[in-house]
Amino acid sequence: MENIIVQKYGGSSVGSIDRIKNVAKQVVKAKYSNNKVVVVVSAMGNTTNELIEKAMNVNKNPSSREMDMLLSTGEQMSISLLAMAIQELNEEVVSLNGYQCKILTDDKHKKARIMDIDSTRIKKELEQGKIVIVAGFQGVSQSNDITTLGRGGSDTTAVALASVLNASKCEIYTDVDGVYTSDPRIIKGAKLLDRISYDEMLELASLGAKVLHPRCVELARKYRIPLVVKSSFNNKCKGTEIMEANNVEKVLIRGVSLDESIAKVSILEVPDEPGISYKLFNELSNNNIQVDMIIQNINRENINDISFTVKTEDLKDVQTISSELKNKINAKDLVIDKSVSKISIVGTGIAGNSNVASIFFKSLYELGVNIQMISTSEIKISCIIDNKKGREALQYVNQKFKLCGECYILEEKVV
Ligand code: ADP
Ligand code: ASP
Ligand code: MG
C-alpha cells in the first residue's frame, strides 16, 4: 500500500493565487512520488486577522461561538481554491472542512482541543486515488458547533491527521527555511537548525517561537510522528527535522525565544489559607487558560501576593475570573501589567550546567534589564522583563551564547 504523507501549508504559503497554484504543483509532485497525499491549509495570508478586525467593528465583545463560526471561513476559502488549482492540473481532489472530516473537539471555543478524528471519509477518498485537502485550525464539538484550535492551530490539525492516518511523515511548509535558533525575522544571523528534539521544540514553541503551534509538537512527541519544517518557497533547503533527543546532536543551548504577547497578573494581599491557589488555577484551567509562571510571596503574617503570567489573548477571561475570585476571597487588589515580555533560553544542556543560568542573568544585567520573574525546567530558563527591552535582550543573549554569527557552540566548548 502506498505511503500516506500529510503536508501543511501556512497562511503566507497560500497568500495569493499564484502561491496557491505553486502549492498545487508541489502537492501533485508529492503524489507522483508514490504517496497518498493529505494536505492541510491555513487561511490565505492575513485573512484570519482581517476577519477578527471585521468582528470587532461589529461587536467589541462577540461570543466565542460566533467568532469560531467566522474564523473557520478563512480556511474554507483556501481549501476550495487549492482544490480548484489541483483540478486545473487534471488531478482528482476533494476538499473537506473540519465538520466533514469529523475532527471532534471539546467545546472550548477559540482554543478547542482535538479529541478524536474519524478518518473513514479521508481514507475512502484516498483509496479512490484523490488528493485530500483538509481545512486546518477547525473542528466540531459534541454539540455540533464549529470550533477553532487557537491561533496557529493548523499545524495541530496536520499532526493529528498524520497520527490517525498512520502517515509516514508530516511536513509543515512555511515562510522561513525551518526552525532557527531565534526568530530569523528579528535576529540577524540566527542559525537554521538541521535537527531539534521534540522536547526542545515544545519549549521553544510554548515560549513564543510561533513557527509551530505548541499542541502540534506535543502530539508529534506523544505519537512519535516524524515532523519536518521547511520552506514552501525554497525547495533547495532540507528544513528542520523534529525528532527524539538521542538522534540530535547535543548542545548547551538550542535557541532563545521572546514572547511579547503575555501579561503579568497579580492578586495582592490574599489571605494565606489552604485552597486559594487551587480555586484560582482550577477555574483558569477549566476555561482552557494556560498559566505560565506562578510566584507566591509571603509578605507578612497570613497575607500573600500571587503573580502569574498568561497570554494576552486570554486576558479578558483571566480578568473576569481573577476579579471574581479577588472579591470572593477578600484580596486587596488585582493588578494587570501588559508591559512585560518573556525571554527564554532552551536546550537539553541546561540541566547539567549551572554556568548557563549565570551567563543568561549576567547578559540581562549588562543591559541594565531588571528580572521580574524567573522560572526554570530541566531544559529552559525564562525571565519576565520590561517589554521595551525585549528585542535588545534577545539579540544580546543570542550573541552571548553565540547562537548567531559564525560560531555555534557545542556542549564541550562553553562560552
Ligand atoms: P505559517 O503561516 O506558515 O504557519 P507562522 O507565521 O505561523 O507561519 O510561523 C512562521 C514564522 O515564525 C516565521 O515567519 C518567523 O518569523 C516566526 N518564528 C519565530 N521564531 C522562530 C524560530 N525559532 N524559527 C523559525 N521561525 C520562527
Ligand atoms: N488561520 C489561523 C491563524 O491565522 C490558523 C493557522 O494559520 O494555523 O491563526
Ligand atoms: Mg503558523
Image: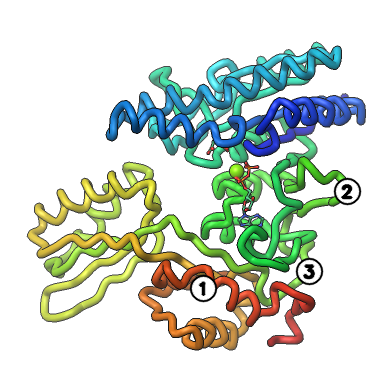
Q: Amino acid under label 2?
A: Lys
- To which quarter of the image does residue 400 belong? bottom right
User: Residue 327 appears at what percent x and percent y?
Assistant: 10, 54
- Name the element at disc 1: strand
Residue 193 relative to residue 339: left or right = right
Count neighbours of disc 3 (C-alpha within 10 A) and say few if under 14, some if 14 to 19, many if 20 or more: few
Q: From the viewer's perspective, is residue 393 above or below residue 309?
A: below
User: Residue 57 appears at what percent x and percent y?
Assistant: 34, 30
Residue 227 relative to residue 154: left or right = right
Please give the residue where the numbered disc 2 appears in the rendered image: 236
User: Residue 35 appears at what percent x and percent y?
Assistant: 86, 28
Query: 139 or 276: which is nearer to us?
Result: 139
Q: Nearer the viewer, mark 3 or mark 2?
A: 2
Q: Which mark is residue 381?
A: 1
Question: Which residue is rendered at x = 28% and y = 34% of the image?
Answer: 60
Please give the residue where the numbered disc 3 appears in the rendered image: 249
Q: CA distance from mark 3 to mark 2?
A: 23 Å
Q: Nearer the viewer, mark 2 or mark 1?
A: 2
Question: Which residue is rendered at x = 36% and y = 75% of the image?
Answer: 372
Q: Amino acid under label 3?
A: Glu
Q: Which mark is residue 17?
A: none
Q: Quadrant of ligand 2?
A: top right
